[in-house]
Image (cartoon, grey):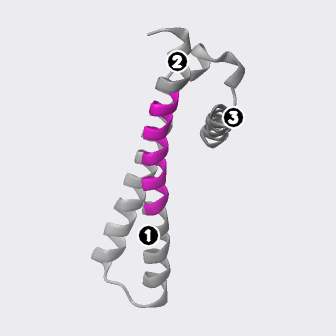
């Protein structure tokens, strides 16, 4: 793979991580909704326990997505991106693609 292919490869990898991040965000939204619903009524202990377990699983999933992003070694290939968030890097690549298309 050539250096010129690196942005394309990186964009594909970032898209995959961002898809996972969107899924994690959707799960978080569902958990928040469920938490609100449970708080409004009397929930069985089993429901509270299940919700707690799902929240812990969500936290682990979020950490794993962050680890996956880190494992892409983006900062080794592009040291100028060091310290930038995943969303910001994606925005940069979208702007790059837009510039190329124009």
Secondary structure category for the residue under label 1: helix
Quick check: is 22 in the magenta stretch? Answer: yes
Q: Which mark is residue 6?
A: 2
Q: Residues within 10 Å of mark 2 (few under 14, many from 20)?
A: some
Quarter of the figure with the N terminus: top left
Residue contact at pointers 1 and 3, CB within 8 angstroms: no
Secondary structure category for the residue under label 2: helix
Residue highlighted by disc 3? 99
Decide which of tag 1 and tag 3 comes sooner along the chain: 1
Q: Which residues are magenta?
A: 10-26
Q: Nearer the viewer, mark 1 or mark 3?
A: 3
Residue 36 lies left or right of residue 92; in this view the side is left
Q: Which mark is residue 30?
A: 1
Q: Nearer the viewer, mark 2 or mark 3?
A: 3
Residue positioned 50% across, 71% down in the render:
32
How far is disc 2 from disc 1 in space, using C-alphas? 36 Å
Q: Foreground: 1 or 84? A: 1
Residue 73 lies left or right of residue 19; in this view the side is right
Residue 17 lies left or right of residue 50; in this view the side is right
């Amino acid at each position: 793979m050539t250096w010129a292919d690196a942005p394309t490869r990186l964009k594909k990898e970032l898209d995959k991580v961002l898809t996972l991040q969107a899924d994690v965000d959707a799960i978080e939204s569902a958990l928040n909704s469920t938490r609100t619903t449970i708080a409004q009524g009397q929930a069985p202990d089993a429901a509270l326990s299940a919700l707690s377990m799902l929240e812990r699983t969500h936290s682990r999933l979020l950490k794993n997505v962050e680890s996956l992003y880190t494992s892409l070694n983006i900062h080794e290939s592009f040291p100028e991106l060091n310290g930038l968030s995943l969303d910001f890097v994606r925005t940069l690549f979208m702007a790059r693609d837009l510039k190329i298309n124009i």
